[in-house]
Image (cartoon, helix red, strand yellow):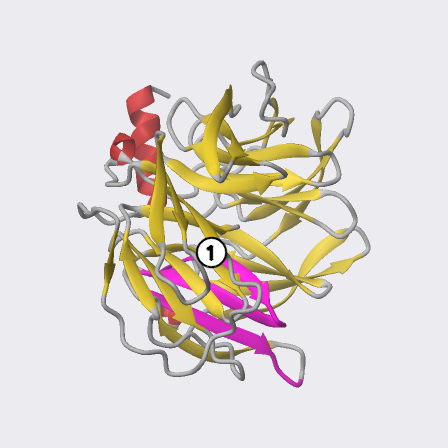
Amino acid sequence: MTDAAAGLEAAAARESPAGHDGAAGHDPAPEAEFPTVDAGSPQRLYVGSYTASSGGSGAGITVLERTAPGQPWQSVQTVEADDPSFLVATEGALHAVSETTEGRVLSYTVSAGRLVAASSAASGGAAPCHVLFDPASGALVVTNYVGGTVSVLSGDPSLTSRVAHTVALPVGHGPVQERQERPHAHQASTTPWGTLLVSDLGTDRLVEVVVDPVTLVPEIVGVHLLPAGAGPRHVAWLGDRLVVAGELDARLHVLRRVGEKLVVDHSVEVFEGSSSASGVFPSHLDVDGGRVYVATRGRDSISVLAPGGDGRLELVGEAPCGGTWPRHFAITPGVLYVANQGSDTVAVLPLDPETGVPGEPLDVFTLGSPACILPA
């Protein structure tokens, strides 16, 4: 594949609308409908963004700080980088994927609250879109979307000669021809039994991987099937069950472990009528307080679901995301931060203490093409 073709595929995979120019700033927001919980609130946010490399309007990684809970966020540092679309923190360090055709992992140390460039390494494939710290091996695990590979490399930011140990996902395809022509690794997540699950949007599979803690070499040890056309993107554990967001079918698939296999227990719509709606793409998924939160691009909303009396997920409520094209969000006590890529904004939404459903924004600040938000 040529560099140009890979770049076009990476852009299409994001299904992103055109960005808007914008600099850091605040927009007025109405008063919250209910009080927020300040205990444990973060004092620093790291925001990764899409940059001019892919047609975005972000500058790289933005560091925001505030003096106390309830005070406005202020930009204190911007680190230029090409498409740092996903971030993960380790002790004393921050790591980002550079979602480019070349594919890089960028590592920074944190000194006196500022990011200091430490090292850069090849990601092991084109368009890396997710990075995870694996506590079992102490390594970084990177999923390369266009490359269809998963790579493992040392999490030590001081190592300037890090090498990515890479394994290709099994050959296959799905029924959605324009998105599922071959494997597309979208996310890696840990399991309670010490392995990793890689979401393969291109083949409707979760690929189970084990990492040698000494050599950091990954090995595929299992494959778990999802409904055809689901397009698994992000996953999260709800107790002993795994919830998978289907980007292509706009459904949540709940899996349980039977022997060595993960099997679908039931599937539900992200919002009422989502599976038949056009132009809607669930993105990030997380679990907090026994509730499942999922953002949907095109719908520009956050859905909240919880287990009902029969154990099946039920929709608790749905609320606007405070912008357009919500790509990612982060939950802190009483508050949800949304990276709205399409509107070049980060929205700060209070969570109802009874239902968990987001309310009107406490704050909305401008930041070019935000793709990932990480409280610290």
Q: Residue at x 44, y 27 (%)?
A: 126
Magenta stretch, residue numbers: 280-309
The reply, left or right, for residue 306 in relation to residue 280 is right
Q: Nearer the viewer, residue 342 or 78?
A: 78
Q: Residue 146 sits in which quadrant? A: top left
- Crowding at dot 1, Cα within 10 Å, few <14 / some 14-19 / many 20+, comes out as many
Instruction: Confirm whether the magenta stretch covers residue 301.
Output: yes
> x, y percentage for residue 321?
35, 66
Q: Residue at x 23, y 41 (%)?
A: 57
Q: Nearer the viewer, residue 42 or 328?
A: 42
Instruction: Confirm whether the magenta stretch covers residue 11.
Output: no
Which quadrant does the N terminus fall into?
A: top left
Q: Secondary structure at mark 1?
A: strand
> x, y percentage for residue 85?
41, 40
The reply, left or right, for residue 170 in relation to residue 181 is right
Question: Where does label 1 land, which residue?
Answer: 284
Extreme left residue here? 21
Q: Residue 62 sits in which quadrant? A: top left
- Please determine whether, in this image, residue 130 is positioned above or below residue 263: above
Q: Residue flagged by tag 1: what amino acid is it? A: His
- Please determine whether, in this image, residue 86 is positioned above or below residue 326: above
Q: Is residue 272 visible?
A: no
